Image (cartoon, grey):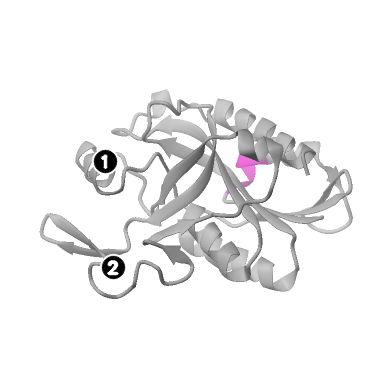
Amino acid sequence: MKILIVSAMEMEIAPLTTWLARREGDNAYRCGEHDIDVLITGVGMVATAAWTARALTQVTYDMALSLGLCGSFDPAFVPGTVVHVTSDHVVELGAEDGDDFLTVRDLGLQRGDDPPFEEGRLVNADPPVNAALQKLPSVEGITVNTVHGNARSIDAVVRRVQPQVESMEGAAFMYACAIADVPYAHVRAVSNFVEPRNRAAWKIPEAIAALDGAARDILGCL
């Protein structure tokens, strides 16, 4: 199997790439019988969409796996929890109308079922069949350019779309894989709760360790 692993920052998957066997080529690895290419895109939707789409047009992959950290809106998903994001929103795409927010659907610029969207969301209805992946909680995500750290904006987005986690790249990865028709999974480890910015409460090393364990389990089940 040929697998593409995508991450925004090298440090998010550094333990995994140390564990994987190297093969000839830049960012080229092996896990058992599987060849793995690692793509570090940089932070944000634009970089992730561009570099992931480029990679998927250059090589035929059997599966793509996005690995990274996220913030949690849901008290059930504490720092260190690993989740499988199967539905994602690009929540900032639209227009402000006073205190209200209008989505591109509200503006008549996009229908909710315009491919690859389903009712305005990116939905991974057919992820790879994988026992370790199936054990992870399936969650609703949002993808943002500006992570939430203000009580008012947090309340507004929770009331609008009821997200469970947020990232800065997830929907871009999902969009690129969907239009390339490549099976994919978007896996995140919670590093913090989404709240007024409180870096003292972040658990980044713990989240990276949990993500590494989940990634090894997923690759081991292929």
Q: What secondary structure prevails in the magenta region?
A: helix
In the image, which residues are magenta? 9-13
Q: Amino acid at mark 2?
A: Arg
Residue 55 is at least partly visible in this image: yes
Mark 1 neighbour class, 10 Å CA radius: few under 14, some 14 to 19, many 20 or more: some
Q: Is residue 44 visible?
A: no
Give the mark nearer the N terminus: 2 vs 1. 2
The picture places residue 52, in percent across and down from the top left corner, at 61, 63
Q: Is residue 202 left or right of residue 194?
A: right
Residue plotted at (57% across, 64% down): 178
Which kind of residue does numbered mark 1 sit on?
Ile
Is 66 on the left or on the right of 168, as rendered? right
* Residue farthest left in this picture: 98
Question: In front: 216, or 137?
Answer: 137
Q: Position of residue 6 (x, y in %)?
A: 64, 53
The part of the image, by quadrant, that contains residue 151 is: top left
| Picture quarter with the C terminus | top right
Image coordinates of residue 1 in percent, x first then y, are 82, 55
Q: Position of residue 60 (x, y in %)?
A: 75, 68
Q: Which mark is residue 167?
A: none
| Label number found at residue 105 | 2
The residue at which mark 1 appears reads as: 154
Distance from disc 2 to disc 1, alpha carbons, whole Å, reads 22 Å
Furthest toward the bottom, the residue is 109
Q: Residue at x 86, y 43 (%)?
A: 21
- Left-right relation of 37 to 168: right
